[in-house]
Amino acid sequence: MDDVVFIDGLRTQALIGVYDFERTGPQPLVFDVEMTMDTRAAGSSDALGDTVDYAVVAQTIEQLCAGSAFALVEALAETIAAQLLRAFPIRTVALRVTKPQAVPAARGVGVRIVRHAA
């Protein structure tokens, strides 16, 4: 069974971008994360150890962004997805990364990827 643990609208900052003006300092990013797993054990036990601690997932994303120097959001997304799959007992991660200030006429631009555990 695949249940979903999610984080919606996680706001953080990262040094990311291709253009010189994007490389002058960190810019805002917004993450939407969906992680699939079987949550029945946690539903029965009511124990955090039987599920994914989304606070720790959020910290992981924030730390990876703080150390980011990627040009592309695709590269940052791949790095984050790989780390989440390694560090947490999840089957799949769907990760949406939005750069809200990248294109002034748009609410945001970015990438959405889906990766599966090996």
Image (spheres, rainbow, N blue to C red):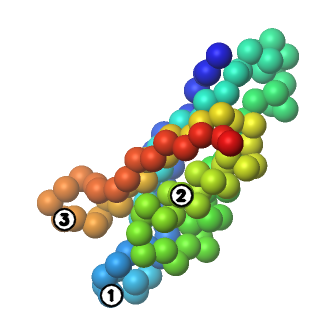
Q: Who's the residue at 63% across and 54% down the image?
A: 82
Q: Is residue 60 visible?
A: yes
Give the answer, above or below, for where 51 lies relative to 112: above
- Residue 83 quadrant: bottom right
* Number of residues whose C-alpha sits closer than 10 Å to that of mark 1, classed few (under 14), some (14–19) or many (20 or more): few
Outermost residue to the top: 44
Does residue 111 appear left or right of residue 78 in this picture? left
Q: Residues within 10 Å of mark 3 (few under 14, many from 20)?
A: few
Residue at the left extreme?
105
Residue 66 place in picture, x, y as percent: 59, 70
Does residue 91 appear to the left or right of 112 in the view shown?
Answer: right
Quote the CA–CA distance across marks 3 and 2: 25 Å
Report the mark closest to the observer, 3 or 1: 1
Q: Which residue is mark 1?
A: 20
| Residue plotted at (71% across, 21% down) | 39
Residue with the mark numbered 3: 104
Q: Amino acid at mark 1?
A: Asp
Per the image, the residue denoted by label 2 is 78
Q: Are marks 3 and 1 in contact (CB under 8 Å)?
A: no
User: Tag 1, which secondary structure?
Assistant: helix
Residue 41: percent from the left, percent from the top? Answer: 80, 18
Q: Number of marks in the image?
A: 3
Question: Which kind of residue does numbered mark 3 sit on?
Answer: Pro
Q: Amino acid at mark 2?
A: Glu
Reply above or below: 28 against 25: above
Q: Measuring 70% from the left and 22% from the top, which residue is drawn there?
A: 38
Q: Position of residue 105 (x, y in %)?
A: 14, 60
In space, the residues marked 1 and 2 are separated at their CA atoms by 23 Å
Q: Are marks 3 and 2 in contact (CB under 8 Å)?
A: no
